[in-house]
């Protein structure tokens, strides 16, 4: 996609610049160099207005929409399965889906220098976040967990700044902090100001997920986003297959319609397809800006919790929604 855009850009340079001169080998070499540069440096193409940044935001937004169904899906799955069974089975099923795609398309193994980053993605996104949030949902409601995890955009932006050396603008950070404060205030108001065991698990989940998102966004500049999460899932297979076997032998299992539907969505939607478009979006618009789109995730999850789980929507939700959307607009327009 970007290669096509880049090639179009290079062609325009090659045709328009030497209009009065015959095409020479040097001219062709220059056009080839420009095309290669455009492919390797998507940020530069974006500054020239050629990269579809809006498309990148759309892809990241689709990822957020997918993630917003994760907690309701988990709640459904927990109706018929234990927490360890849910986490391990969702990862195994997603790994089968991803591994099949990698095999059918004959994707080569990643370069050795990328495996450390893939391991971080695996530990944070494939194992850490799903396990910690699933355990938290045993004592927390879906709506409460959603607003606590609303702090993830700020956590991801901070992790990205530390890892990549990115320096977003002051306006960006102010809008991010305001959005995070709104979400945190909403969470504290709903919990009565007394964080419990579930909150501690959710805060830990924020840290490991932010690390996984940051590494995934960085790797997605070197390989397609679906391959990043695909190899991370495959890397975890020895752990998840063993864990699934142990969990199935020790935890109760009741295959209800809700439980099966929730598990399948977690595996196909949240664990694989959602992360595919999410990492692709981050590769186009950057980790920090993409992460701010997640400020809308807790509000979307609140809607799903009402429609799918029958939970009561807190009165403060509409006000929070407006404040969060305003922060998203500011962060998307702020330049780092």
Image (cartoon, rainbow, N blue to C red):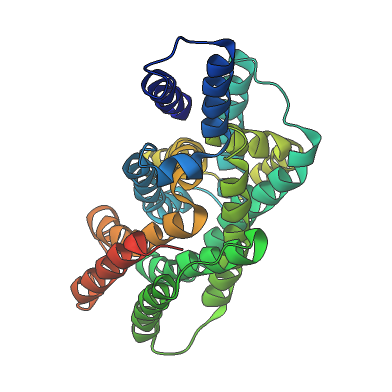
Which x, y percent locates residue 264?
A: 45, 36
Residue 102 in percent (x, y) is at 61, 22
In the picture, residue 315 is in which quadrant?
bottom left
**Residue plotted at (41% across, 70% down):** 172
Q: Residue furthest right?
A: 112
Image side of residue 9 versus residue 245, left or right:
left
Query: Which residue occupies 36% across, 22% down?
Result: 16
Q: Which residue is drawn at 67% across and 41% down?
A: 244
Report whether 99 appears left or right of 34.
right
Q: Is residue 189 visible?
A: yes
The front one of 43 and 202 is: 43
- Whether residue 259 is visible, yes or no, is no
For this rendering, which residue is in front, 159 or 202? 159
User: Which of 138/161 is in front?
Assistant: 161
Relative to residue 49, is residue 180 depicted above or below? below
Q: Nearer the viewer, residue 139 or 149?
A: 149
Q: Which quadrant is the N terminus positioned in?
A: top left
């Amino acid at each position: 996609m970007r290669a096509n855009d880049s090639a179009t850009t290079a062609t325009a340079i090659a045709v328009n610049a030497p209009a009065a001169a015959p095409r020479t080998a040097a001219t062709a070499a220059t056009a080839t160099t420009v095309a290669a540069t455009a492919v390797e440096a998507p940020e530069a193409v974006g500054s020239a207005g050629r990269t579809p940044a809006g498309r990148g935001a759309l892809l990241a937004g689709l990822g957020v929409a997918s993630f917003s169904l994760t907690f309701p899906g988990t709640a459904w799955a927990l109706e018929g399965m234990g927490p360890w069974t849910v986490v391990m089975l969702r990862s195994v099923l997603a790994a089968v889906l991803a591994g099949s795609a990698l095999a059918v398309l004959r994707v080569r193994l990643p370069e050795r220098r990328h495996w450390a980053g893939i391991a971080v993605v695996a530990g944070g996104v494939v194992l850490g976040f799903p396990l910690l949030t699933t355990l938290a949902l045993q004592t927390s409601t879906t709506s409460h967990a959603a607003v606590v995890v609303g702090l993830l955009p700020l956590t991801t932006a901070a992790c990205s700044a530390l890892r990549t050396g990115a320096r977003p603008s002051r306006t960006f950070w102010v809008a991010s902090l305001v959005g995070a404060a709104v979400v945190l205030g909403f969470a504290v108001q709903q919990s009565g100001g007394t964080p419990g065991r579930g909150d501690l698990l959710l805060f830990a989940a924020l840290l490991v997920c932010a690390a996984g998102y940051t590494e995934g966004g960085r790797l997605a500049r070197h390989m397609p986003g679906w391959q990043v999460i695909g190899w991370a899932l495959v890397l975890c297979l020895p752990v998840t297959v063993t864990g699934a076997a142990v969990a199935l032998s020790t935890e109760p299992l009741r295959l209800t319609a809700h439980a099966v539907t929730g598990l399948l969505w977690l595996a196909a939607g949240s664990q694989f397809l959602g992360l595919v478009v999410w990492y692709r979006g981050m590769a186009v618009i950057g980790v920090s800006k993409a992460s701010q789109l997640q400020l809308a995730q807790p509000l979307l999850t609140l809607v799903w919790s009402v429609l799918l789980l029958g939970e009561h929507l807190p009165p403060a939700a509409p006000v929070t929604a407006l404040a969060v959307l305003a922060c998203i607009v500011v962060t998307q327009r702020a330049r780092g």
